[in-house]
Image (spheres, helix red, strand yellow):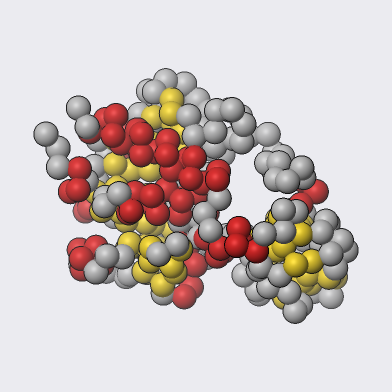
């Protein structure tokens, strides 16, 4: 019988969905380690462990991720009850850590190199992976009836390119850069209530206006260079401030699919 508490889970990515997965697995007492790129650009920063890349630590709903620079720090970070995060875009730490489970949670809509031989159990989130081919299992990430569904064969639904419906709004709730330039804040911050066409931020001197009324659920970090049309924020029409600082229903559903896959594989 495998000691589930000793299972090491390596998660590739530390954005919103990866954070939802990491949070649930850490709460279930798995040994979780995260990797990410050097300059992550999460929109829902208040619920993304990748913010630890910039700020050393990031806490989400009672679980804290901490950026480390040396593999020798992993065990000590686990012992302190925290989740280690490494800047490691190629996920090379897997060669030393030898995880029992690897979760590709980059959500790039395509496979950026993950293969089945990276761990005894490899799970891919969303489109771009084929269960039984490049990964062992796939979890559906598209909102709808199958959100969080675990596939042992086949693929998740193709990327629609349309944001999920939240409070009756889909694409309408997304803030996009009006031009190429450097993103900078006005006086608004995540959690603030905004009205239709309120100025939320700027790209250069061009204003970024709220497309609908609601709360600012997400904004990318200031001083990031953006391209025209790039997603830079998200307005939640449900206007519940607490939603900005807690893991979403979507992330929890996906995390449940990952947990199901791990238990199915190891709890035999």
Q: Quadrant of the C terminus?
A: top left
Q: In which quarter of the image is the N terminus?
A: top left
Regarding residue 203, the answer to whether it shows in the image is no
- For this orientation, the residue located farthest to the bottom is 187
Residue 93 image point, x, y percent = 29, 55
Depth check: give the residue in front, 164 or 202: 164
Residue at image point 52% right, 54% down: 247
Residue 235 image point, x, y percent = 73, 57
Residue at image point 14% right, 42% down: 3
Q: Is residue 97 above or below residue 224?
A: above
Regarding residue 266, the answer to whether it shows in the image is yes
Name which quarter of the figure residue 188 lies in: bottom right
- 154 relative position to 197: left or right: left
- For this orientation, the residue located farthest to the top is 153
Residue at image point 75% right, 67% down: 193
- 64 relative position to 247: left or right: left
- 114 relative position to 239: left or right: left
Name which quarter of the figure residue 178 lies in: bottom right
- For this orientation, the residue located farthest to the left is 1
Depth check: give the residue in front, 29 or 199: 29
Residue 267 image point, x, y percent = 22, 32
- 149 relative position to 213: left or right: left
């Amino acid at each position: 019988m495998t000691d589930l508490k000793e299972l090491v889970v390596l998660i590739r990515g530390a954005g919103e969905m990866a954070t939802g997965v990491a949070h649930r697995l850490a709460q279930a007492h798995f040994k979780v380690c995260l990797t990410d790129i050097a300059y992550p650009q999460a929109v829902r920063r208040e619920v993304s462990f990748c913010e630890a890349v910039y700020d050393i630590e990031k806490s989400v709903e009672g679980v804290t991720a901490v950026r480390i620079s040396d593999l020798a720090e992993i065990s000590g970070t686990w012992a302190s009850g925290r989740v280690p995060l490494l800047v490691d875009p190629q996920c090379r730490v897997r060669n030393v850590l030898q995880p029992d489970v690897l979760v590709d949670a980059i959500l790039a809509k395509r496979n950026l190199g993950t293969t089945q031989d990276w761990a005894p159990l490899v799970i891919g989130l969303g489109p771009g992976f084929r269960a039984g081919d490049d990964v062992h299992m796939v979890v559906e990430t598209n909102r709808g009836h199958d959100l969080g569904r675990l596939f042992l064969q086949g693929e998740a639904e193709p990327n629609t390119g349309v944001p999920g419906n939240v409070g009756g709004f889909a694409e309408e709730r997304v803030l996009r850069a009006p031009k190429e330039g450097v993103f900078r804040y006005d006086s608004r911050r995540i959690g603030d209530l905004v009205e239709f066409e309120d100025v939320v931020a700027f790209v250069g001197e061009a204003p970024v206006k709220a497309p609908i009324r609601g709360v600012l659920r997400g904004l990318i970090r200031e001083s990031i260079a953006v391209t025209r049309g790039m997603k830079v924020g998200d307005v939640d029409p449900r206007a519940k401030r607490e939603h900005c600082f807690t893991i979403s229903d979507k992330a929890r559903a996906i995390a449940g699919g990952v947990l199901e896959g791990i238990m199915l594989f190891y709890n035999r």
